[in-house]
């Protein structure tokens, strides 16, 4: 049976040890199917390799307006709904309590609200800006 070896950056391990008991830490594993699998440990760390973001959030990530690991949130007071989602390096959103990463802000919002909704105007960064505001900022630059 083949052996799988995972190498983590020390900053990631520090984050794991500092996590609160109820905090969710998301780990994304990507396998490069274009290159053959190696049977020996890599000579250099994979931590420095960048993942190319794709999809609707890609340009926001590429321009630094969003960061991998950044937590977005929304709150609908009247409906009594709130949620958080973590941005992945691939440009997806992992919504707390949902196992599947979502490829668009609206799909992630629909997963929570169970009705069609514009996720661009719903999800907010920690400083309160909507994804739509970030997208507009990108277009103006």
Image (spheres, helix red, strand yellow):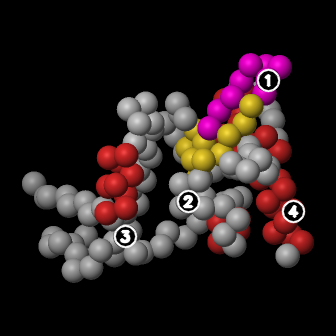
Most extreme residue toward the left, as rendered?
1
Q: Earlier in the sequence, mark 4 or mark 3?
A: 3
Q: What segment carries the magenta color?
A: 76-84
Answer whether labels 4 and 3 touch (C-beta < 8 Å): no
Gap between marks 4 and 3 measured at Cα: 32 Å
> In the image, is residue 40 part of the stretch drawn in magenta?
no
14 or 1, which lies in front?
A: 14
Q: In 3D space, how far apart are the residues under numbered discs 2 and 4 (Cα atoms)?
A: 20 Å
Measure how far apart labels 1 and 2 are at the Cα level: 28 Å
Of callouts 1 and 3, the N-terminal one: 3
For residue 19, which quarter of the picture?
top left
Q: CA distance from mark 1 to mark 3?
A: 40 Å
Across and down, in percent, residue 64 comes to 66, 69
Q: Which picture quadrant has residue 135?
A: bottom right
Q: Residues within 10 Å of mark 2 (few under 14, many from 20)?
A: some
Q: Observer-nearest residue: 61 or 39?
A: 61
The residue labelled by disc 3 is: 47
Q: State whether residue 54 appears in this view.
A: no
Please identify the quadrant where the N terminus is shown: bottom left
In the rendering, which numbered label is found on residue 113? none
Classify mark 3: helix, strand or loop: loop
What is the number of the mark on residue 68? 2
Name the residue that disc number 4 marks: 136
The secondary element bearing badge 4 is classed as helix
Marked residue nearer the N-terminal end (2 or 4): 2
Residue 37: x %, y % from top left: 25, 70
Callout in the foreground (1, 3): 1
> Label 1: which residue?
77
For label 2, the SS is loop
């Amino acid at each position: 049976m083949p052996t799988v070896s995972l190498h983590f950056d020390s900053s990631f391990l520090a984050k794991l040890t500092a996590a609160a008991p109820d905090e969710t830490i998301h780990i994304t594993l990507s396998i490069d199917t274009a290159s053959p699998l190696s049977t020996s440990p890599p000579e250099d760390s994979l931590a420095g390799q960048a993942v190319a973001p794709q999809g609707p959030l890609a340009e926001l990530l590429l321009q630094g307006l969003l960061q991998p690991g950044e937590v977005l949130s929304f709150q609908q007071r009247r409906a009594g709904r709130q949620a958080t989602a973590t941005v992945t390096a691939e440009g997806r959103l992992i919504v707390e309590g949902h196992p599947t990463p979502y490829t668009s802000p609206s799909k992630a919002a629909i997963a929570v609200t169970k009705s069609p909704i514009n996720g661009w105007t719903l999800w907010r960064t920690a400083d309160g800006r909507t994804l739509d505001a970030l997208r507009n900022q990108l277009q103006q630059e």
